[in-house]
Image (cartoon, coloured by chain):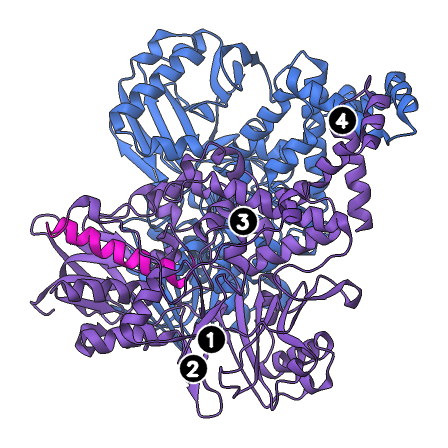
Chain colours: A purple, B blue
Amino acid sequence: MSDNIHDVIIIGAGISGTSAAKLLHEEGLDVLLLEARDRVGGRTYTARAPSFKYVDLGGSYIGPTQNRILRLAKDLGVDTYRVNVKERTIFQAGGPSTKYVFQGSIPNFYNPFVVMDINNVCKVMDECAAMVPPAAPWDCPKAAEWDKMTVKEWIDKICWTKTAKEWTIILTRLLYAAEPEEISLLYFFWYTQSGKGIMRLASTDNGGQERKFIGGSQTISEKIIERIGKDKIKFNSPVVRVEQNTDDDVIIITTASGEQFKTRHAISAVTPCLLGRMTFDPPLPPKKIQFIQRVPMGSAVKSHLYYKRTFWREKNFNGMAVTGGLVAIALDDTKPDGSCPCIIGLIVGEPARIMTTWTKEERKKRLAEFYAEIFESDEANHPIEYIDNDWLSEEYSGGCYVGVMPPGVLTSFGSVIRTPHGCVHFAGTETATEWAGYMEGAVQSGERAAREIMYAMGKIKESEIWQSEPESLDVPALPFEESLIEKHIPSIPGFLRFLSLSTLIVAGAAILMRNRSIIEQVKNKLTDLF
Amino acid sequence: MSDNIHDVIIIGAGISGTSAAKLLHEEGLDVLLLEARDRVGGRTYTARAPSFKYVDLGGSYIGPTQNRILRLAKDLGVDTYRVNVKERTIFQAGGPSTKYVFQGSIPNFYNPFVVMDINNVCKVMDECAAMVPPAAPWDCPKAAEWDKMTVKEWIDKICWTKTAKEWTIILTRLLYAAEPEEISLLYFFWYTQSGKGIMRLASTDNGGQERKFIGGSQTISEKIIERIGKDKIKFNSPVVRVEQNTDDDVIIITTASGEQFKTRHAISAVTPCLLGRMTFDPPLPPKKIQFIQRVPMGSAVKSHLYYKRTFWREKNFNGMAVTGGLVAIALDDTKPDGSCPCIIGLIVGEPARIMTTWTKEERKKRLAEFYAEIFESDEANHPIEYIDNDWLSEEYSGGCYVGVMPPGVLTSFGSVIRTPHGCVHFAGTETATEWAGYMEGAVQSGERAAREIMYAMGKIKESEIWQSEPESLDVPALPFEESLIEKHIPSIPGFLRFLSLSTLIVAGAAILMRNRSIIEQVKNKLTDLF
């Protein structure tokens, strides 16, 4: 064991760990990053090759209100470019008969019941999200009720039409890489709040998917290491033991190869479930031991098919397709200069769990066939290159994008999420209060944990640990303009109440039951029809 | 590293690991057990002291149909005794006004609606459980539907009366040490099937809680080690790495201290979530990586209050109380000869997560107060000794009693549960098909994994891997006699259909809706009342 006692050791060199390291290094502290893999970046991972230049195999998108990652990127000299959404987008829930082609964020569903219904889902999501305190969702007045429900239960309850139901299921998969029955409703609303509401969270233009980094998102962590020095990181060093001696205030950290490192303070910047790979002495508190068993990672495979030409644009498609099939979302990943024509396909939730058993060749073929059908062109069947990453197989991430919470976790265990364990502090995007699950959340959590240590060292005041971030001047957030019609679209039950029809029905049956039960009947009818 | 290459290394010396070791040792094979703790037994842990002689702080109860553990105990010379249930039992859902005192297995709820309702819950549980294939629950025709639901959703749907709802919630907590919203309905029915139906699973007399081992349940693992030899086990040896070299068929296993052991075959006999503590090379398959993130341990604290006298028996209570309060179940734990008067209290699910933050003194005081109220005696306030075990704090179990499955896990990931990884085989009570979660399941799984290796070695046929067990002659299973009335008690909707009342209502409203919606109304009324 080296006798050198570091000021801070950071476990995990993803965006959270490296942004913590940067801040502490700039404060003049001696930091060391211990990374399990042979690379930085964690869930951001950029492949490079002459044929496609660079491609993000993991986390990739940024957008307005993600001001910390935008500030960090600017500081490091990493530029962004906008994702192509000029042409028409596709939404397809089931087979070809359910295909909608449209311009903008939300499909024109023609059917007024469907429009009302989806509008209502979004409204309720935002209203409920606004009730959840971002740093303490367990304190929400509705916490107990919502944390006992799955998102699937809520969808079955709130949606009147089949299309709205399918749309909301696809949205859930897309946001979490998990199925609606796997997720607590409280967690779902909290996450929506953390992502600044459903429109900001789910939109490409003016939302979380507006931009990408030129050169790839892994560049962020790489440039941080360049800046702080390559001697500040040890690769291939998965941590297996964290021992805190309360007598001399020294933490001894052991890696799988038996190497030991000493430090005064530590930050764990890994996803909760990976904490289970380390033995803590003294052990983690009981609630933390059980918390980290209860935040499984989503299931995502990210795939890229390269083509000779952007054939989809010629058919006035922008390459974006949101579907209930194999690919939850496809997006144009052609470089901003028009080179390397590419369709990204995200396979998430159950389809990812099926795809993980296929060979690369099988994946390529089935994806090409899928695109040929959805973009209505046989050219899709002739990709010139295929590259993907199966995040389920990455044992040092455990999955992607993010640790999700089933019912009961937030209210019974959530409050331990950021509580330091002696001199060990907890970062990682799951511990963020803004844009948790995104690169922005990773930076917020890394810098917050770094400042917890700066506070413990007497360098800053307690009130300075949590800091808000000024808005990026380059990527400002525009308001989402709600048209007068959207604002005043009623929900389906509201609409039925408005129609005198329902009043008549209610009157006719008033002796035997309340209004609600008739509406229940009409609802079942509608779900069957649309 | 020792050059000695073992035939089999077994990770974990609980009942599953030691019963595998016993079988393989008897076959003449050279086995080595690697145990993380300084003791054998895993979730069976017996404390000993002159004052209370011995007490099981973990798994403890056995009963008819658990023929493997009964055979193993007999072989090892460990006797059983019957738990006292002679006097009256207590059921109390909420406050004192909800208290029922009764003789036998199920409270006399007087109110015929409650009797019908609870009877219906049990009937449906058994009917549904019978539909689930024990070795492949994901193949059940209803698998997709049930695995998308929580047990809470099912309870809300099936129960008409508040008392039946509370009874079913308490039953769920008792069986899983978790809350109904945390558990998949498919898993719940599968577990019921694995425990031979609700009556066998939940009963004391003639069920899973009929008996205990004289000397304590840890004796089983201890006697196995005595028999196979103390040189066959290494304590304080948590495994951190399992490396399989496919060229020379040798597995290298590394423990936290850096010690390495070589073997031809290995068995992991730990609970699924603990597999995440080990790095596998080659890594576990993607679905297994995500499966082990999704089987969190239940939350249980087991407490024992010792008294001068069995004061509860004097009031004609047998010491058994099933409640919706602090203690889910209390049981008489006085020794069979009448010495060491004791009440065991199991604190499970949410109450355990609260209790884990209390001091020992606080726990003792609150439990004593609880018993004083429920057994109607101030003597309960004066225990002479207190001992408990907080299983949430045991990092090498992760909780108790068992790894439970939230919605989506069994159907999406369950099929990987027993698939060997190269020459590594998987045991542990969670992988059993009979009495999973119990000592019986531990033995079944340990012996099955041992025979997988014997098959791989060419010592037995493939058809001999899974073996049924002849019934224990000492502890035979009696049928549960259903009285004629019980057999023919209708469910509440059945009862309402029987009454012409409902026919009249239906006729009156037939134009507007179906039968179901009226029954829905009546149901809401009943839930409010009872």
Q: Horizontal and vertical percent for residue B210?
A: 53, 30
Q: Are marks 3 and 1 in contact (CB under 8 Å)?
A: no
| Residue that appears at 38% across and 40% down | A136
Crowd around label 2: few <14 · some 14–19 · many ≥20 (10 Å): some
Q: In the displayed structure, would residue B422 be above or below residue A524? A: below
Label 2 marks which chain's residue? A
Quadrant containing the N terminus of chain B is bottom left
- How busy is the neighbourhood of tag 4: few (under 14 within 10 Å), some, or many (20 plus)? some
Q: Mark 1 or mark 4, which is nearer the start of the sequence?
A: 1
Residue B501: % across, % down: 87, 16
Distance in Å between CA atoms under marks 2 and 3: 31 Å
Mark 3 or mark 4: whose residue is earlier in sequence: 3
**Spot occupied by residue A486 in the image (x, y as percentages of width and height):** 64, 48
Question: For residue A47, which numbered disc appears in the image?
Answer: 2
> Please, what secondary structure does the residue beneath circle 4 have?
helix
Front tag of 3 and 4:
4
Q: Pointer 3: what residue?
A: A183
Magenta span includes A38: no
In the picture, the disc for residue A515 is 4
Q: Are marks 3 and 4 on the same chain?
A: yes
Element assignment for label 3: loop
Which amino acid, by three-letter code, is at mark 2?
Answer: Ala
Residue A57 bears which disc, if any?
1
In the rendered structure, which segment of residues is drawn in magenta? A437-460
Q: Is residue A374 visible?
A: yes
Classify A518 as above or below A24.
above
Foreground pick, A332 / A480: A480
- Rendered view: B483 above or below B123: above
